[in-house]
Image (tube, rainbow, N blue to C red):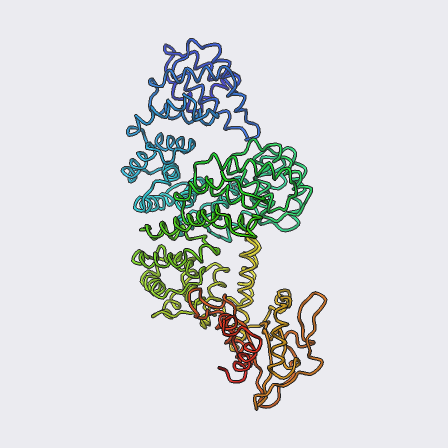
Amino acid sequence: MSMFRLRAVTGSRYLRRFLHGGAANRDHVLEQLGICSGEDQVLEVVGKNKAKLTVNHVGCAIGMLWHFQKEKPQMLRTVEFIKSHPEFLTLRVLAENKIELMDDVMLVDMLYNVLRLNVEPSDSLAQQLVSEAWLRLYRFPMPSLSKFAVCLSDQHLQHSPPMGQITDILNQKLSSIDDARILTTLMVSVSSLVSPHLRDKLINKADHLLDTMDPSHYNNPRRMVQFLRNIKYSYRPLLEKCNHILLRNVPHLNAENISIIMGLYQSIQFNNCDFRLAAKQRLMELVDSSADPFSFTKLFVALGPMAGEDTKERLESTALLLAEDFNAHQALAVAETLEEIQCRNLNLIQKIASVVHKNLHVYKPMEIARITQALILLHYQSPELFTKLRNILVQFLLNSVYPYEVTMLTRVLSMLPSPRLDEGVVSRVEAVLPQCNLNDLNTFAMAVAKWVRNDPSYRHSTPSKYVRLLQTLNRCGHERLRKADRLDLVLEELKYMSGEWFEEMLLEETMVTLQRLEDQISWTNVPEMALFLTRTNHLCTPLMDRIASVAMENINKIHYSATYATLLPFAVLNYDPPGVDELFDICIQRSFDPHLLVLLAYALAVADCFPEDLVREIFNVNFLAKLDSQLESMLSDHIRNRIRLRLMELNRAVCLECPESQVPWFHERYCLQLQKKGDPVQQQIHKMLGEVLGGINCARVALLTTYFYTVDFECVLDRHHQAVAYSEQSQLQISEDGKVRWGSDSVGKDRSEVPPGAQRVAVDFLDSKSFCKNSRHMKGEAMMRKRHLEILGYHVVQIPHFEWNSMELSTQDAWKEYLRKKIFTGS
């Protein structure tokens, strides 16, 4: 039996390194370690041989302790038992005394193992090992170098001088690395320090190694995706190659691995339908075997957001049974998932909140922020818990020195009700503002806006502390834009910018900065630039001309998934630069995922472009079935609903503008569900129209046309341009659900014929969303709507918001005169 144990355990490299001598060189301590089958026996051997322990014995013993731990499932590990054992303290003291005797491999292994055994980075052993390893850095073999890089990352030393030297070594020796595990480990570790040049070299090397590595080693492509996430660089060719390998391995992945991969995909905005469907199927297979808190939490986080209603109910029932056994971090993960799936199971929310409440002392600053946000969005009611959370948030904020941490804590703090803001919080925020990026500044601006609104003294005047904060915010924002010299960094900071403060204080300066850096627009950042212009509704013709030019020259380099984003501003902002038709034609010939194809086709429809092959491909039973399957697996309800809306609008546009394609209209039921309730303001305008037209029964309000356009107001003018009254049965009806209807005419069917020579007139009020932000240039969707209403037989009178709300039209008589001119003379 002893020999069997020896042979079994000597499979560990910790013993293979030392058990190589003959009988004359027998090492009895190593032999005793060799027959150990658990950590308690290893510690017993250490206790019996304290005086005999050499550097090899210490290295072997600590290596075996971690080896036994990592072979166990997470929930069965006994790291805390080992860490508190007196013989482990003996090993730590001996290890620290023998550091200089360790060879390079043992030195790094020792550091790696003690960190895995939860020795604090501040412990003298860990610090001495790091210092010694730093001295030997340039002579480490590549496997040890990559392991040391992991150790530095574990200690949050990603920006330390040793990590900078590792980055330099990686750059020098990159061509000699042929092990994908070593390369990807180093890539993740040094990701915060890589230059664009080294980034491209690493991506090319990783791409090459993916072709030669064992495809079953799925952690290598996972780390490549993690590297791209860390550097915020969505390089699609490498992502797709990694996804192909990960997809092949889905049947062998557990819930934790799937959860990690899907989290990485989500953060880098990589949506792959095939992976999601395969992952969902695999997770469903794991439901029955995930009955303990650890495995269930991983399953719930991964499967919950994409599960159907029945599966969600089943998962919530299991979570309720396990709730009291969750630890602090499992409760946090479950709470965030409950918020993501918009759970309304009050009993479950209460139990998870109870676990959180008992473990508040365990959470770190960012975790407290996350749990507070989740409970707020779950509409959990507990003044006692939220008071405690607020106090903890404030304390963490006052003590924090990290801008990203202060930003997150401030944002969540602003979500909590509070009569007054602590002066200490204001001072802390003000101190970090000069170090913040644009996105962080925008977050602070939104928080300040909430505080101002909630402050009781705001009714009289804006308190000076808020005025001072806003002035500092404005100054820091403008300074950051004026000093910016790298377009990619500016676009990264602008990616999620929105809100009144940005639009009113920084948007114009932002456009000046982007035009100043116009020469840096390249095929790699064209999609981000285009998305920014679309999102802000800002028509800047020099930038759009540059986007079109760069895209035309480099269309084969731009990944197909970025094509839609590149074309979007030209359609949405209704701008046709030179050669845009050729750009559209080239893009149409590329392959797309179903949901992207629908979005692209809609954008083209807005631009009055209906490629026959594209229309035929989309309005095909097989394509629509595949699209439905893809939409079911999507994590975001918002994205899913947006694509369904775009498909409806594309269906309507094709039916109206391409009747020869014979595409059926199949969205009537969908449109009935989308009908909007009546607007009280319409009643006032309706009354004015009645006075202009000669009677209230001469105008209809909120009329639904064929294909479900809602016309704000409709009237009929005869051949003499006199208003024609509608019959009694066509008068306005408001149903019990508050929806406006016009008898049997509510969806544009069976409309009564107009008199010979008469004309139906649609009066459409255009709000600010119908125009570009910086001008009165009408956007593409408003133009398409006008086009479609004209096809339906209307003369369209458009009323822009800036005319209707102008100082010139400040009286009832002025409004009526304006309507009279618009309707009767078209002026």
Q: Between residues 265 and 764, which one lies in front from this camera angle? A: 764
Residue 485 screen position, x and y as percent? 31, 51
Q: Would residue 372 appear left or right of 213 to someone viewing this image? A: right
Q: Between residues 52 and 487, which one lies in front from this camera angle? A: 487
**Quarter of the image where one finds residue 739:** bottom right
Q: Would residue 540 appear left or right of 297 to someone viewing this image? A: left
Q: Is residue 12 visible?
A: yes
The residue furthest top is 51
Q: Is residue 247 visible?
A: no
**Quarter of the image where one finds residue 572:** bottom left
Q: From the viewer's perspective, is residue 815 above or below residue 434?
A: below
Residue 547 screen position, x and y as percent? 35, 62
**Quarter of the image where one finds residue 128:** top left
Residue 395 screen position, x and y as percent? 52, 35
Q: From the viewer's perspective, is residue 754 above or below residue 579?
A: below
Residue at figure coordinates x 69%, y 42% from the top left: 347
Q: Between residues 641 and 454, which one lies in front from this camera angle? A: 454
Residue at figure coordinates x 40%, y 67% from the top left: 584
Q: From the viewer's perspective, is residue 103 above or below residue 714?
A: above
Residue 40 screen position, x and y as percent? 53, 17
Q: Count numbered badges in the picture.
A: 0
Q: Between residues 57 and 697, which one lies in front from this camera angle? A: 697
Q: Would residue 76 appear left or right of 46 to someone viewing this image? A: right
The residue furthest left is 172
